Image (spheres, rainbow, N blue to C red):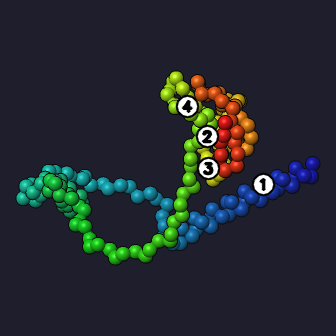
Amino acid sequence: MRIMKMRLKGYAYLLLMAVYIIAIWFTVLNVMGCSRTIPVGIQEPVLMAPATPQQCANGGTQVTLAGQSYLACNGAPGQSIVGPAGPQGEQGPQGSPGQDATPVTVVQFCQGITPAYPNAFPEVGVCISGQLYGVYSANDGFMALLTPGTYNSDGINASCTFTIAPNCQVTQ
């Protein structure tokens, strides 16, 4: 039961502190000259009328507010607000040397078969940085690293057994 009373005292203390902070905030605002009234918008009517050709050669609007008149003229047809191109800038510093891209080579697994889709479709692999990758068709097919060893290719009218050696070398 004591724990419950302590919680109620804690919440009451927090509520009292919040009220105290809000009272200080309103006092500071009043001392600074800020009133709590919300200003109402402009009470005078805003008058709008087309500008005369003497006021705006390409048409426009004359707006009258609180006894003051303002003109909003249209620009001339075909004119742009973009100015002329500036002078050529000076040459920048030379960039650092680049590096050659990693070569990618396509390797056909079953040699001597000319692709003629859909009649002959020999399977191929991709050699990247001395590693051969190919689509392994078991388990819905995925790109896999083909390590050195013996494999079977079941391409359409292009089946064979082939061997992969290091550095993407393929023999039948």
Amino acid at pointer 4? Ile
Mark toward the viewer: 2 or 4 = 4
Q: Residue 2's x, y, as percent?
A: 92, 52
Residue at image mark 4: 113
- Distance, label 3 to label 2, CA atoms, is 10 Å
- What kind of element bears circle 1? helix
Q: Residue 172's x, y, as percent?
A: 67, 36
Residue at image mark 1: 11
Q: Is residue 124 above or below residue 14?
A: above
Amino acid at pointer 1? Tyr
- Distance, label 1 to label 3, CA atoms, is 68 Å
Q: Residues within 10 Å of mark 4 (few under 14, many from 20)?
A: some
Amino acid at pointer 2? Gly
Labels in figure, total: 4
- Distance, label 2 to label 4, CA atoms, is 15 Å
Instruction: Check contact, mark 1 vs mark 4: CB within 8 A.
Output: no
